[in-house]
Image: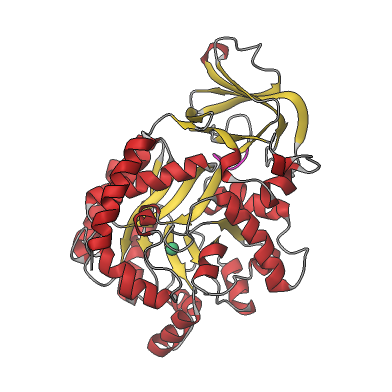
């Protein structure tokens, strides 16, 4: 085993997220990696493993890679195209008409672009929902990212699969193709209660059940969604999918902004996982999800950016800072969503939301080697009294120096090792011209 160690990261602080979220400070604190796993954590391991690559930083902070619990990576091609609009206008007048004209190539390159941004800002796993999921999966594997992903279902024809029947066949195929993948896990993704009939929702839930997969949906995002659900089905979105039998521990519900106290109790009883996306909720003026109340009821909370057309980036450091501050405004209580709770949501909470808390989300010997190192020798991070505080309130994605996913160094000294960033940006400028011409 000793000769298998191929990377050792060494720094000054280590936040393992194992037990409490406090930091261990010790010059030369190191993590050793063999194959795809963490094999040892301790001081000065570089000397013990001279054959390994040594990534050292005297002011380095080593921590678990961040987990983006809800995103649409390929929406990077729509960033900045239509801002300052309500969700329904934004979706129906700008996003859905353009999504109807998407191609495999656009989705593939736009997903790579978001992955590029995610790795550069410390994210090592994401939970993606989009069209052309085969292309998303191809991009994820090529980039060496870890992702949960699936093809989005709605009642109208898809630019990828056309009629819904083909969509289900396409997702069954995804399950088959990626059943042994070390990076890709397939999920079942009905878009929302306002875009999916009860029959479609139940069929999607049955597929998730059969495949032992997560069911990932947008839920209770806006007042409009609640109003239209009450008009069509006589109840709220949460009650509607409860009536359809969808509320269970398999369900990952993004947003949950418009939920009242009894619904939070119900979500907690059903062990539903919540992906909190505060910046998207702010930009679309959807509201503020009561996540502190949800945490108080024992709900599992992950943190997500949503797509970068409604954020407008996929930087989880920015999302952490917003999550902490926005909840304080919502509750008019500065003790709401403390820094340690936010950091937990962005790491181990996200892992638990994905049912992967035994594999990722904390730095523990035997877990997958998904970790990042930040260089804390920065004007905005000096002096450093409390590393958790700095990570949530002061650090930037650009402070991430190295990133390792599944034991592989995917960013070294801020250089991506798996992607040709310059070529990708050139391609995306060309795609941008195509997207702009879409009507
Ligand atoms: Zn979304």
The verdict on residue 257 being magenta is no
Quadrant where the C terminus is found in the figure: bottom left
- As drawn, is 10 to the left or to the right of 190? right
Q: Residue 414, position in %: x, y? A: 52, 32
- As drawn, is 305 to the left or to the right of 47? left
Which of the two residues, 229 or 334, is positioned nearer the viewer here?
334
Which of the two residues, 168 or 99, is positioned nearer the viewer here?
99
Which residue is farthest right? 385
Q: Residue 152, position in %: x, y? A: 33, 61
Task: Magenta stretch: give its range.
Answer: 358-362
Quadrant where the N terminus is found in the figure: top right
Which of the two residues, 233 or 244, is positioned nearer the viewer here?
233
Q: Residue 16, position in %: x, y? A: 68, 37
Using the image, determine if residue 72 lies above or below residue 381. Answer: below
Main secondary-structure element of the magenta-colored stretch: loop
Using the image, determine if residue 402 lies above or below residue 343. Answer: above
Using the image, determine if residue 125 lies above or below residue 239. Answer: above
**In this view of the protein, can residue 19 be seen by the observer?**
no
Using the image, determine if residue 173 lies above or below residue 53. Answer: below
């Amino acid at each position: 085993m000793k000769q298998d160690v191929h990377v050792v990261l060494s720094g000054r602080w280590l936040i393992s997220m194992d037990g409490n979220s406090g930091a261990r400070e010790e010059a030369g604190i190191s993590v050793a990696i063999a194959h795809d796993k963490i094999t040892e954590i301790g001081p000065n391991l570089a000397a013990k493993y001279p054959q390994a690559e040594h990534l050292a930083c005297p002011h380095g902070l080593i921590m678990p890679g961040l987990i983006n619990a809800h995103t649409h990576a390929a929406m990077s091609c729509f960033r900045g195209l239509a801002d300052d609009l309500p969700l329904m206008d934004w979706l129906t007048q700008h996003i859905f008409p353009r999504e109807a004209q998407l191609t495999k190539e656009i989705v593939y390159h736009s997903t790579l672009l978001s992955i590029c941004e995610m790795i550069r800002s410390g994210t090592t796993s994401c939970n993606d929902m989009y069209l052309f999921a085969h292309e998303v999966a191809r991009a994820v594997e090529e980039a060496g990212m870890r992702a949960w992903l699936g093809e989005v279902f709605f009642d109208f024809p898809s630019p990828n699969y056309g009629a819904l029947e083909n969509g289900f066949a396409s997702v069954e195929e995804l399950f088959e193709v990626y059943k042994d993948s070390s990076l890709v896990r397939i999920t079942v993704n009905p878009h929302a209660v306002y875009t999916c009939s009860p029959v479609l929702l139940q069929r999607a839930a049955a597929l998730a059940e059969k495949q032992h997969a997560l069911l990932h949906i947008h839920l209770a995002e806006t007042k409009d969604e609640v109003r239209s659900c009450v008009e069509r089905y006589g109840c709220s979105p949460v009650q509607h999918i409860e009536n359809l039998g969808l509320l269970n521990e398999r369900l990952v519900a993004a947003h949950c902004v418009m939920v009242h106290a009894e619904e939070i109790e119900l979500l907690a009883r059903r062990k539903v996982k919540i992906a909190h996306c505060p910046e998207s909720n702010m930009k679309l003026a959807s509201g503020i999800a009561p996540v502190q109340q949800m945490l108080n009821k024992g709900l599992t909370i992950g943190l997500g950016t949503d797509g970068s057309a409604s954020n407008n980036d996929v930087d989880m450091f920015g999302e952490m800072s917003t999550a902490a501050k926005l909840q304080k405004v919502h509750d008019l209580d500065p003790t709401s969503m403390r820094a340690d709770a936010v950091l937990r949501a962005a790491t181990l909470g996200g892992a638990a939301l994905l049912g992967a808390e035994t594999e990722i989300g904390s730095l523990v010997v035997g877990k997958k080697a998904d970790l990042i190192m930040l260089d804390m020798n920065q004007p905005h991070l000096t002096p450093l009294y409390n590393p958790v505080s700095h990570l949530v309130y002061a650090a930037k994605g650009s402070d991430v120096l190295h990133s390792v996913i599944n034991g592989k160094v995917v960013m070294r000294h801020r250089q991506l090792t798996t992607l040709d960033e310059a070529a990708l940006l050139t391609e995306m400028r060309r795609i941008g011209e195509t997207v702009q011409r879409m009507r």
